[in-house]
Amino acid sequence: MEKIGSLLNRLLNGFMVACLVGMCILIFSNVVSRYIFSSSITWANELSRFFFVWLIFFGAIGAFIKNEHMGVDMLVKRFSKKVKKTLYIITNLIILILLYNILDGSIKITQLSLDSPAPATEIPLAFMDGMGIVVSIGMAIIIFINLFKVFIKKDDIDQYILSANEMDLMDESIDGREE
């Protein structure tokens, strides 16, 4: 399961890099074309906008995997492990409800935009609108995997509440006390 997660994480990072590189190349080419040839590449702005939307949504999944989304957890960090687990369940249930709403809305808007092409590239706008479907399903899967790890595999709850940077700082402070 860890190998699959690692593969999917590398694939996600690859998509983000490809989107960023594609966006930079398109925008740079368009700027050069405007100054040298006094004309722009008509489809470059549109395609770079697609790449930007994909990059943002893939980045949201990547941040969710690493527990890097902003959250107010000052109070939660002070509770016992049992209370943290209870709050973790409640928080994730709320997130799942919100993800369901995003999924439902994204499906509806994607269906509406299937026949609506972008003006310059003729790419259906559903490719941009459908990212809400990808993100909501991806994040829901991550939530279920994390809940499985916490409650079935008995992983430490703190690694799902604290970000990786906070875990490193906590480890350093514990190591510093032992010396």
Image (spheres, rainbow, N blue to C red):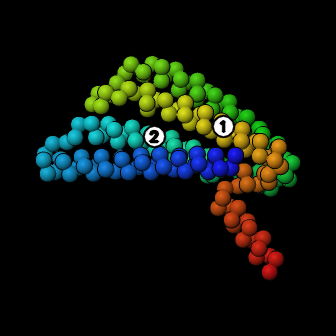
Which residue is the site of mark 1? 141
Write the residue at 83% across / 43% down.
152
In the image, farthest residue toward the left? 37
> In what element is the residue under mark 1?
helix
Q: Is residue 106 above or below residue 91?
A: above
Give the alpha-carbon distance from disc 2 to disc 1, as whole Å. Answer: 19 Å
**Secondary-structure class at tag 2:** helix
Task: Locate residue 48: give its quadrant.
Answer: top left
Q: Nearer the viewer, residue 174 or 131?
A: 131
Say which amino acid is labelled 2.
Answer: Trp
Which x, y percent locates residue 117? 34, 24
Number of numbered labels in the structure image: 2
Q: Residues within 10 Å of mark 2 (few under 14, many from 20)?
A: many
Quadrant placement of the C terminus: bottom right
Q: Position of residue 28 (x, y in %)?
A: 27, 51
Mark 2 vs 1, N-terminal side: 2
Query: Dot 2 corresponds to which residue?
Result: 54
Left or right: residue 118 versus residue 8 is: left
